[in-house]
Image: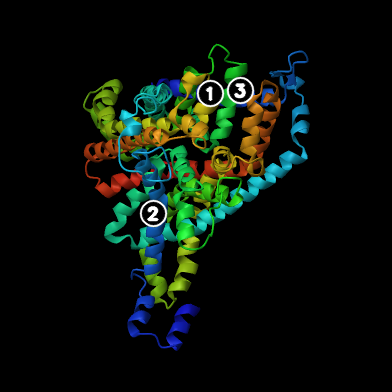
Amino acid sequence: MSGAAGAGQTAPPRRHAEWLANPWGRPRFLALFSWLYIVWSIVPVLIAIQFSFNAGRSRSTWQGFSFRWYTSDPDLSVLHNPALRAAMTQSVKLALLTMLIATPIGVGLAIGLARWRGRASTAGNLLMLFPLVTPELVLGSALFLVIVFLYTSVHLGTWAQLLGHITFSISYVVIVVRGRLFAVGKEYEEAAMDLGASPREALRLVLLPMLAPAIFASLMIVFAISIDDFVISSFLAGGAESQTVPMLIYSSARAAPNPSLNAVATLMLLLSMTAIVLGILMHRRLAGGDGQKGAVESFARLEI
Amino acid sequence: MWPTFAAPGLIWLVLLFLVPFYAILSVAMGTLDPIFGAAVPEWNPLRWDATSFAEVMNSTTLQVFGRTCAYVAIAGILSLFIGYPVAYFISRHGGRFKTTLLVLLIAPFWISYLMRMLAWVNLLQDDGYVNRVLMFLQILDRPKSWLAGESLTVVLGLVYGYIPFLILPLYAALDRIDRRLLEAARDLGASPLKTFLSVTLPLSRQGMIAGSVIILLPMFGDYYTPDLLSGSPGNTMTGNQIAFYLQAPSGANRGAALVILLSAAVSVLMIYYLITVARAAREAQ
């Protein structure tokens, strides 16, 4: 380490040399760099949220605090502008429906693939992983073309978007639920069956309650990824009525004449954050034993 | 009983994942209707026709693809150089702030990508905070139009957008390293730098590759970042070209052909990622 050797020759303060030599000491440069990174990653979003409360029309000059762009402006606020309200409704509707349909399908797939042994299940596992590694642009184009040219009875618009959202959500549910399935193991079901439960009863009375934290977490995660999705929604959109909030941001971010766009984005952020916090809290409560750190870290590893 | 559980999901994925991929192929290998000029897919592989591929392989496509590769490569390398120290610090020296830091690190995951780009569109306006800070610091003497076709803005936008997805796997890999190995290296006389280079760095290689692949894949399919942060034809990426072709009824063949070419170009990354995820799943089992 030339730096340390060089520093030794020029006789730095002893404290400094020890600091360099101590592998467990706090490296101040790294600490500063990391905190700067965190500031860089979070602060722009906080400023965007701040401007949603701007009293004036500017999105770059602060003119005082108000709820003008949420409620009070008679034409342009989220409450009164039909286009903003429609986009919010569409995003929430899609996210709720996706969550309610993709979660049961994914839970079934996770249980089926984990317990069923055979060549078909290996192929199923591989098929389930593919949507995770496919760039969204590719999946979006594929779904767009199949709906335009083959599944012509499904028209572009809300139904197509719903099919698309469910398709990419299923794999996330499988990953989350499968993690819990492996952690629980087969012993509890086997014990239940030794004690006279039928396989169906073992599943309903033993396995499903033990999977509850993962199922709840899946619901929340699916809600959050669906509400944030842009590419799939955009490729499968029909007319103006299928515009979601991310699509609205895409089409009007550059031209937006006032901060109502920031306001609608802030409301969506609040929704997806609430879902995730609920997911983490419930996961922690239901899973038991896991500390806070465990829950946060398992959520952190989820999206890889 | 178990196949019954898996059936709805498997059928769903076959109908809405495998069949759509066949549809891309059929459209790319299809023809144009001579009267209406609209794309006609060819479902029979024996009658496939590769004309659309020849049509899209022109100098513009190559130039745009070259630019896409350059943007993605620079953004990927920058992300790695910014992300590694952060992941390293949190895993090794997070201390009592570790959970807080992790929560802050994860937060951008759950903020819509478009919202995060909107934030930068606000900041980079001519009278926005970035120009004001740079002018206050006397780095600029008049406002710079960051959003009018700057490659730098697009590349930094890509870094900002995707870096959280790189840091987490990297953090996981660094956190798994057994500290006793580091202590052993130090006890055997290795300097901190030598310990880092010959123990930490090789042991985190998997995490670096996995994290990079995770961000490179969506970057290759990005079209909204250049659209939002530049909008100039001089900054378009392959994703923009695909989105453009697919919007017109007569462009579907060429759009589909480009999707296949792009997928082929990134297939090595996809297969690597698939193997990693499958291996992680087996290990968890």
Q: Amino acid at mark 1?
A: Leu
Image quarter hosting the C terminus of chain A: top left
Q: Who comes first in sequence, dot 1 or dot 2?
A: 2
Badge 3 crowding class, 10 Å Cα cut-off, few under 14, some 14 to 19, many 20 or more, is: many
Q: Residue at position x 25%, y 45% from top?
A: A290
Mark 2 near mark 3, Cβ–Cβ under 8 Å? Answer: no
Is residue A62 placed above or below A10 in the rendered structure? above
Mark 1 or 3: in front is 1
- Give the image's coloring scheme: rainbow
User: What separation in Å lies between label 1 and label 3 (alpha carbons)?
Assistant: 9 Å
* x and y, in percent, of residue A246 in the image: 46, 32
- Left or right relative to B53: residue A55: left
Element under disc 3: helix
Specify whether disc 1 shares its chain with disc 3: yes
Q: What is the number of the mark on residue B193?
A: none
In depth, the one of B243 and A201 nearer the eye is B243
The chain that hosts pointer 1 is A
In depth, the one of A71 and A8 nearer the eye is A71
Residue A60 seen: yes
* x and y, in percent, of residue B36 in the image: 73, 14
Q: What is the number of the mark on residue A145?
A: 3
The chain that hosts pointer 2 is A
Is residue A8 placed above or below B126 in the rendered structure? below
Q: Amino acid at mark 2?
A: Ile
Q: What is the number of the mark on residue A236?
A: 1
Q: Who comes first in sequence, dot 2 or dot 3?
A: 2
**Circle 2 sits on which residue?**
A38
Badge 1 crowding class, 10 Å Cα cut-off, few under 14, some 14 to 19, many 20 or more, is: many
The chain that hosts pointer 3 is A
* x and y, in percent, of residue A203 in the image: 29, 25
